[in-house]
Amino acid sequence: MKLLVFLLLLQLCGSADCRCFCQVTGNLDDCACDVETIDHFNNDQLFPKLQNLLESDYFRFYKVNLNKPCPFWTSSSHCGLRHCAVKPCSPNEVPEGIRSPSHNKYSADANKQLEECEKEQHLGAVDVSLSDETREALLDWSKYDDEAERFCVVDDEASPDSQYVDLLLNPERFTGYKGPEAWQIWNSIYEENCFKPYTVKRPLLPDSFRSSSGGEARKFYSWLDGQCVEKRAFYRLVSGLHASINIHLSARYLLDDNWFQREWGHNVTEFRQRFDSELTAGEGPKRLRNLYFLYLIELRALAKVLPFFQQPSFHLYTGRPEEDKKHKEQLLQILQLARSFPLHFDERSLFAGDEKEAAKLKEDIRLAFLNISKIMDCVDCFKCRLWGKLQTQGLGTVLKILFSERQIEALPMSSNQRPSFQLSRQEIVSLFNAFGRISTSVRELKNFRSMLAEER
Ligand SMILES: Cc1cc2nc3c(=O)[nH]c(=O)nc-3n(C[C@H](O)[C@H](O)[C@H](O)COP(=O)(O)OP(=O)(O)OC[C@H]3O[C@@H](n4cnc5c(N)ncnc54)[C@H](O)[C@@H]3O)c2cc1C
């Protein structure tokens, strides 16, 4: 009997679906949640609702500067790659309410309230009693305060180079961006910004495993296990994001491109190249588990930020009151659903030690992530740059939320003062769209699972 079970297992694990997914099950490290609970919650409940919301005007138009020069090296441009092109919106395609600059940071009411209150409390006082220089310095300080809490670079919306992009017309999918340029980006993210010493080698191409017979991978994981939970979490977030991008390009692959048609769809071979344990020397399933970890962290931030969106003065302002109201209700339902998730990541396990050390660690992580968001301006393919910028900004916003618990809780009390916590429209749009990408990836895994099972 035992022999029969053994043979059955051997047969199962010899199949491609098992080699991709057999280890993508059960509890996730560093948290109390498991893969199956996330699958069920996401695929059956959250994913359809979120997709619906992301199709609304407020969330589909994202303002971004795709023309910023790379601050680290001279990058070549892949605008020559046909599938890398991004089509920006012409001004009349974007609803007036979104374009109007006064609605960028706050809702209509909150904006007015804030402006009046700022005038009374700050600028009024400054004008009478302080010199112009001091006044300017004060404005600089408040800008600095805003920057100080950020985990990613935010494009200057007022810059003439910043343009609205319709995310539904420019979907994240296979672009053909690969080779040394793409590797340079991933490499500099992992090597220079994930706290890893150069002497510890990252598990790389399958060939490098064969030559080192897995020794380098073992060294890498013993280094990672020896790290504090925060740095380990940071690596897993980045790796989860990388996995998500690669799932999308495998799920929306260019299957056929001829005079008559262009067909996009699932490419199971491409998926296996990236996630089959046999083809990735055991790495693929670990990457998929990191995707689930990223999902949990982003979900936690959505649950936490609910009080911000519950403020009566907050509107998803596009200038069409009926629709705006309906979409706000949808958004609140999604956030309530996120709150109801039974096995949330407990962020109290992070930064729990000595206060001084925790503050230093938090700052290190903030700066590392800030740097990763700058690297996105070095991505040569515009389409990849667009989604890379959006997703790092979304993740940066997630971190900002998780580190602002007290300020978010204080919000209901701060109605007559400067709000204790703010999110700009850009941050809101990137937060939800970035989570939409991760949620879609988890949903796509279900598709790949059944496609691979059919091949068996
Ligand atoms: C910011 C960014 C956005 C991109 N967006 C797109 C896009 O929208 N469409 C598109 O077609 N291409 C996109 N790409 C390119 C894509 O991610 C790959 O780089 C490309 O397909 C080449 O893949 P590869 O198999 O050579 O390995 P890569 O994905 O380039 O990975 C390099 C090495 O990193 C390791 N690795 C791979 N995955 C992980 C992981 N999850 N965790 C840890 N290590 C890992 C492997 O050892 C691998 O050899 C993007 C690249 C970047 C940097």
Image: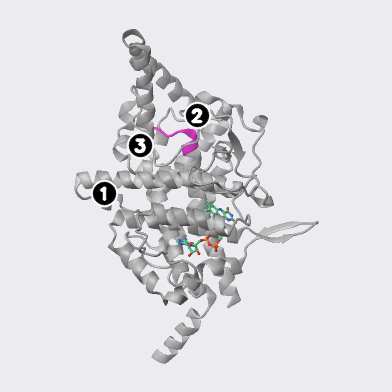
Q: Which residues are magenta?
A: 422-427
Q: Which residue is mark 1?
A: 351
Q: Is residue 213 above or below residue 367?
A: below
On screen, residue 309 versus residue 97, left or right, reads: left
Q: CA distance from mark 2 to mark 3?
A: 18 Å
The x, y position of residue 162, in whole percent, is 57, 34
Q: Measuring from the top left, give residue 204's x and y in whole percent.
A: 46, 66
In which image quadrant can residue 150 be found?
A: top left
User: What x and y, as percent, mark residue 179?
Assistant: 58, 60
Report if residue 424 lies within the magenta region: yes
Residue at 46% in and 33% down: 424
User: Of marks 1 and 3, which one's residue comes earlier in the chain?
Assistant: 3
- Residue 304 inside the magenta-drawn segment: no
User: Which amino acid lies under the numbered mark 1 shown in the image of this protein?
Assistant: Phe
Q: Which label sits on residue 149?
A: 3
Residue 430 vs residue 85, the one in the foreground: 85
Q: Label 1 to label 3, Cα distance in Å?
A: 16 Å
| Amino acid type for the residue under numbered disc 3 | Glu
Instruction: Note whether residue 334 is visible.
Output: no
Label 3 Cα crowd, 10 Å radius (few <14 / some 14-19 / many 20+): some
First of labels 2, 3 by sequence position: 2
Closer to the camera, 367 or 343? 367
Crowding at mark 1 (Cα within 10 Å: few <14, some 14-19, many 20+): some
User: Marks 1/2: CA distance?
Assistant: 33 Å
Question: Please, what is the three-letter code of the amino acid marked with disc 2?
Answer: Asn
Q: Which residue is mark 2?
A: 104
Question: Is disc 1 placed on a helix, strand or loop?
Answer: loop
Above or below: residue 357 compared with residue 205: above
Q: Nearer the viewer, residue 446 or 184?
A: 184
Cβ–Cβ under 8 Å for marks 1 and 3: no
